[in-house]
Image (cartoon, grey):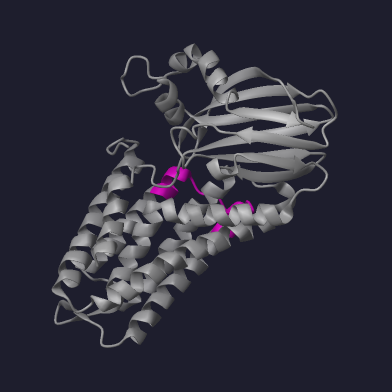
Amino acid sequence: MKRLLLLVASLLIFSTAQAHKPSDSYLNLSVNDKVVTGQWDIALRDLDFALGLDANGDAEITWAEVKAKHKDIAAYAFARLQLSTGDKVCPVVVTEHLIDDHTDGAYAVMRFKAECPERIAKLQARYSLFHEIDPQHKGLLRLEYQGASNAAIFSPQSATQEFTLAEPDKVGQFLDYGREGVWHIWIGFDHILFLLALLLPAVVVREDKAWQGVVAFRPAFWSVLRIVTAFTLAHSITLTLATLGVLSLPSRWVESTIAASVVIAALNNVYPIFRERRWMMAFLFGLIHGFGFASVLADLGLPRDALILALVGFNLGVETGQLAIVAAFLPVAFLLRHTTFYRRLVLIGGSLLIALLASVWLAERLFDLKLLTV
């Protein structure tokens, strides 16, 4: 039970308004003969932590403050990115500085050119941005060559990678997107709390206006199976449609509705409305969560020639991460289902805490506020 409480407490402590996104940067490279042209998008919040962009300390980063740090940003970033071919370094020259908005905030954008000493057959890239201050940071690469594209994810464990331009590694792409799917569901606190809010009552039943532990494991298992299946089916549908460009919804509306879904799911445990029809709630709100997954997948930079492969890999990764959470939760909850500790403190108290946190997210996302800080 202590492990279960520690999990919930960790989610509540480390969740922020941007519950969706970890620290990522987006690196796009295009190779033509000996020349690499590129664009690198780096979150201003991450650069501010590393370089102190907010000169006047008013918690607002302006274009003037970013412009004053252009040289420092370029020096800091490109000291942590090296492109080479045949063990010969390709010197980088920054050609333009811009600002762009992503789903999780403003990013500094650097466009650059690197000219290699020989025609590029294999490109080596060494990436270590923010690794000394944030071991969870990832660099998301999209590499284009003669109409084909490759994708990769840099982390402290895979900081140096080599790409054979004529032969994109389809299996590697699939595994990379699968790992990213697992990672995203594990750090997607709003998704996890929505799922936990639905799962908490799976080991109890409502009798005489009170929660009582189920008699056997089987009813709890089937309840969980219905919920997880409905959620998986729903978000897979909208994830696919959004990724393929068939449907699109405004990001703020999607993120706000996801926060609202967590509030409703949690309060349903205190004032039951759906009762044993929680799978219906999982399906209806799962459709919106799918759009949230799609926004993350879009930011990863999908390879055009391996779109379906990347989509399937990411979705399977999400399901794998989700099943791991369920497998860790259900046995512990079942063992403690008859205790007052579980029925009152974990189920009711935990649900109220989840609802409170999600309400803060909802206010932040609806009104563009900043109520929680890292």
- Quarter holding the C terminus is top left
For the image shown, how many numbered marks are present on the structure? 0
* Residue 126 location (% of width, % of height): 64, 34
Q: Is residue 45 above or below residue 246?
A: above
Question: Horizontal placement of 357 versus 235: left or right?
Answer: left
Question: Horizontal placement of 370 versus 144: left or right?
Answer: left
Q: Magenta region: which residues?
A: 239-255
Q: Quadrant of residue 310?
A: bottom right
Look at 50% across and 49% down and name the residue there: 249
Q: Is residue 143 above or below residue 318?
A: above
Q: Quadrant of residue 277?
A: bottom left
- Quarter holding the N terminus is bottom left
Look at 42% across and 52% down and name the residue there: 188
Look at 15% across and 77% down and name the residue there: 210
Look at 56% across and 43% down and name the residue there: 299
Is residue 250 a member of the stretch shown in magenta? yes
* Residue 54 location (% of width, % of height): 38, 19
* Residue 230 location (% of width, % of height): 46, 71
Q: Is residue 16 above or below residue 329?
A: above
